[in-house]
Image (cartoon, rainbow, N blue to C red):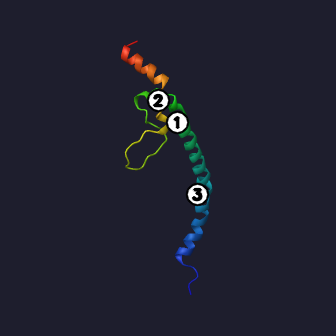
Amino acid sequence: MKTHTPLNISTLLLAPFLGLAFVIFLPLIGFVMVLYLLGSKAIELAAAHAPTHVFKPTWMPAMAFLHRKVKTVHPSLNQPSDMWADDAEHKLNTGV
């Protein structure tokens, strides 16, 4: 009966390094996830008032649509009138 195989010895030698990697990278992964979430929400809020909604009203940053269905308009964009868009369209059409 063998008690010391090379696999057991290498596992014992690598265990402290694997634990160190776990201790170092687990909080790092948590911070990266929180920063990604906050950054995507900040971009979404900043882009909500940007003039890009006149040119591409269905553009929603930080949203993933990973399917092959036909594009649909977001329900909040089905509003009858947008004063800012109407004013911008009037200025573009009249040249004022």
Tell which circle, 1 or 3, labels the residue nearer the N-terminal end. 3
Residue 19 falls in which quadrant of the image?
A: bottom right
Mark in front: 1 vs 3: 1
Element type at mark 3:
helix
Mark 1 sits on what residue? Answer: 44
Q: CA distance from mark 2 to mark 1?
A: 23 Å
Mark in front: 2 vs 1: 2
Mark 3 sits on what residue? Answer: 21
Q: Where 31 sits versus 91, above or below?
A: below
Q: Where 85 sits versus 27, above or below?
A: above
Residue 57 falls in which quadrant of the image?
A: top left
Q: Nearer the viewer, residue 16 or 48?
A: 48
Where is residue 34 drawn, in percent x and y? 59, 45
Element type at mark 1:
helix
Quadrant of image for the C terminus = top left
Where is residue 43 drawn, in percent x and y? 52, 35
Q: Nearer the viewer, residue 55 or 40?
A: 55
Q: CA distance from mark 3 to mark 2?
A: 55 Å
User: What amino acid is found at the position of numbered circle 2 in the picture?
Assistant: Pro
Residue 52 falls in which quadrant of the image?
A: top left
Q: Where 3 sits versus 66, above or below?
A: below
Element type at mark 2:
loop
Tell which circle, 2 or 1, labels the residue nearer the N-terminal end. 1
Where is residue 50 drawn, in percent x and y? 49, 28
Disc 3 crowd, CA 10 A, few/some/many (<14, 14-19, 20+): few
Quadrant of image for the N terminus = bottom right
Marking on residue 88: none
User: What amino acid is found at the position of numbered circle 1 in the picture?
Assistant: Glu
Q: CA distance from mark 1 to mark 3?
A: 34 Å
Residue, x 41% and y 21% (percent of image)? Answer: 89
Q: Is residue 85 left or right of residue 27?
A: left
